[in-house]
Image: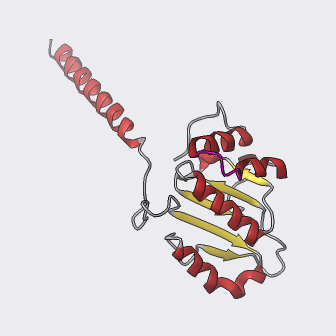
Amino acid sequence: MKSVLRIGILGAMLAVGFTGTALAGDTAKKDYIPSGCQIEKTTICTIEIWLERKHKKNNRDIRKMLKGESIKVIRNTIQYWPPRGGHPPTNIAIGRSLTAEDARWVIDLALRLNDNINGLIFQRLNPPNYVAIGTSAWDDKSETPITPEQLAQLRDPKLTTKEFHALYVKLTGEMGVADAFY
């Protein structure tokens, strides 16, 4: 009798625990916004940029420009490729919570500072308000090549935020792949 009672109590505790976990999981779906992120001014909370060494002389101007856009700039926001390291990758990562306007601004910035964009990092691997330009943080399977025509589609000012992200996910081939990492 005591063991049946114990099993019943354990079962009730597990049921309540799993229900609580499920409810907590539902609220955890909201996008995490880092402290210091001025989401009312820009949807870009974190930006990481890897640039060719030749841009190092413009470091102060680049940081000032980012801060002028209300983007949180920390010490390692901008990194410079080693002197004999060649050119950084010509890819970009755009988080799912950026507005289409901010995403297009980032694409233009990448083209200006990193010369080209020929790869997209899977959106599901990055935090929602995150951007990376010229990143080598992900392996080849985390990136998909894009053509100049596809990049032009992403830059179309007529795209709404929803349309922009749908196109980004379509171009990366992420449709039907596991849920977002973040």
Is residue 144 among the parts visible in the rendering? no
Q: Residue 133 location in percent, x, y? A: 68, 64
- In this rendering, would 142 be left or right of 72? right
The image shows a total of numbered marks equal to 0
Protein image colouring: secondary structure
Q: Quadrant of residue 54?
A: bottom right
The residue range painted magenta reads 155-160
Vertical placement of residue 111 versus 58, above or below: above
Q: Is 162 or 54 nearer to us in this picture?
A: 162
Q: Quadrant of residue 47?
A: bottom right
Residue lying furthest bottom in this view? 57
Magenta stretch holds residue 7:
no
Q: Residue at x 63, y 84 (%)?
A: 61
Q: Is 19 or 144 nearer to us in this picture?
A: 144
Q: Residue 136 location in percent, x, y? A: 72, 62
Q: Residue at x 52, y 76 (%)?
A: 67
Vertical placement of residue 153 versus 133, above or below: above
Vertical placement of residue 80 versus 173, above or below: below
- In this rendering, would 162 be left or right of 135? left
Q: Residue at x 79, y 47 (%)?
A: 150
Q: What secondary structure prevails in the magenta region? A: loop
Q: Is 4 or 76 nearer to us in this picture?
A: 76
- In this rendering, would 182 be left or right of 117? left
